[in-house]
Image: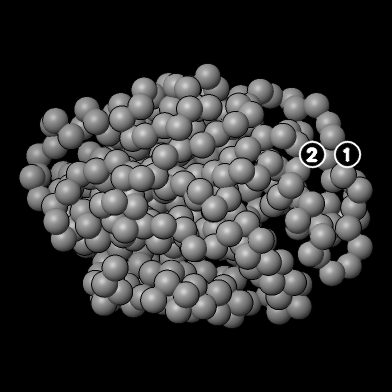
């Protein structure tokens, strides 16, 4: 990937205060982009922890579910984006069970609005839309990008629904120069994740609060990957889209890491944490999730030359480094240093 490509590019990120959006902001800032953000609110996690507000050229706080044409016109006039990353979502399976309507509104209607407004109210050439590895009808299979879509829970169904909306919009978009790419990424982990029901967040909480760690699905297998490995795939897809005028769907899976159960991830974390760690107990899950989830990312490897470079052990050590630094310093420095080290490892 040509890193100079990103210098002075105007980039608009929806969901910029979330976990992925925040790390994408830091990565693009390091690469010299002009960054704008849309979110419904400021969120606990890396965004507030490292005070990301100062990095943005401008932030817009509005709910994409209710985003009006007038609001969109104002945002796109100010940001004038070359590239839009749509990451705003209700991204949790458990939350989908608890609040199905909000999940559907955000992930389906919100996605349609971003598609429509980017098309009609901006001059952006590239729109990269994040969905999920959970969109496949048969999640236990080695799914490629052409496998059948579906969902047995509201989150998965809403994301599959978003994909159908994206496909349909391809046929009606007004601007030929706007190209759409879809990213289905594996389970991303990294420092600063504070989203509810997320494994690393619950690990950190159990340590900080000195309470027993309750593990709901010890044998679940996910395509775990380091946050920067995943985002590197997003950047490669966006650059390919922009430069070659492509419209593609890419799975991002880490074959290095997709044999690890949730219990193994937690044990590796606790084994490498310096200090007292809690007892692990197995509890019954409140809502059903699939046990094994894997996706095939051969296409991303062949077309983009994307492969993850951090294995589970190195990823967990990066999370531990981040969390320990946060306890002592509570600033942006460790995040930037991890990005700089990652870029050196890539190059």
Q: Residue at x 22, y 57 (%)?
A: 240
In the picture shown, does residue 85 fall above or below 291? below
Measuring 38% from the left and 69% from the top, which residue is drawn there?
A: 28
Observer-nearest residue: 8 or 181? 181
What residue do we see at 60% from left, 27% from top? Answer: 290
Q: Quadrant of the rendered structure where residue 84 is?
A: bottom left
At 58% across and 37% down in the image, what residue appears?
92
Q: In the image, 308: left or right of 193?
A: left
Camera sees residue 344? yes
Q: Is residue 103 visible?
A: no
Tag on residue 215?
2
| Of residues 247 and 254, the one drawn nearer to the viewer in this rendering | 254
- Snapshot quadrant of residue 107: top left
User: How did the renderer colour the structure?
Assistant: one colour
Query: Residue 185: which numbered mark, if any?
Result: none
Of all residues, the one furthest to the top in this rendering is 152
On screen, residue 140 above or below 52 = above
Q: Name the residue under label 1.
A: 281
């Amino acid at each position: 990937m040509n890193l100079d490509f990103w210098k002075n590019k105007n980039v608009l990120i929806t969901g910029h205060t979330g976990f992925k959006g925040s790390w994408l902001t830091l990565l693009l800032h390091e690469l010299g982009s002009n960054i704008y953000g849309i979110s419904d609110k400021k969120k606990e996690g890396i965004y507030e922890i490292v005070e990301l507000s100062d990095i943005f050229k401008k932030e817009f706080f509005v709910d994409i579910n209710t985003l009006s044409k007038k609001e969109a016109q104002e945002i796109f006039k100010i940001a004038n984006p070359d590239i839009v990353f749509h990451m705003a979502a209700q991204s949790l399976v458990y939350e989908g069970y608890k609040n199905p309507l909000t999940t559907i509104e955000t992930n389906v209607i919100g996605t349609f609005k971003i598609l429509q407004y980017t098309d009609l109210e901006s001059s952006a050439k590239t729109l990269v839309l994040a969905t999920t590895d959970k969109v496949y009808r048969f999640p236990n299979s080695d799914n490629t990008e052409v496998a059948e879509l579906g969902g047995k829970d509201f989150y998965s169904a809403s994301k599959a629904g978003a994909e159908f909306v994206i496909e349909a919009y391809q046929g009606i978009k007004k601007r030929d120069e706007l190209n759409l790419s879809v990213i289905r990424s594996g389970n991303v982990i990294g420092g600063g994740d504070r989203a509810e029901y997320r494994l690393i967040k619950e690990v950190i909480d159990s340590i900080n609060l000195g309470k027993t760690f309750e593990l709901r699905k010890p044998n679940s297998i996910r395509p775990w990957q380091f946050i920067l490995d995943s985002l590197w795939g997003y950047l490669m897809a966006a650059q390919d889209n922009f430069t070659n005028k492509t419209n593609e769907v890419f799975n991002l899976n880490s074959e290095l890491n997709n044999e690890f159960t949730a219990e193994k991830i937690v044990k590796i974390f606790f084994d490498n944490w310096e200090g007292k760690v809690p007892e692990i107990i197995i509890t019954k899950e409140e809502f059903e999730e699939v046990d094994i989830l894997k996706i095939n990312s051969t296409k991303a490897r062949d077309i983009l030359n994307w492969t993850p470079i951090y294995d589970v052990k190195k990823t967990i050590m990066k999370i531990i480094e981040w969390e320990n630094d946060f306890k002592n310093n509570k600033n942006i420095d460790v995040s930037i240093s991890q990005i700089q080290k990652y870029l050196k490892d890539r190059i």
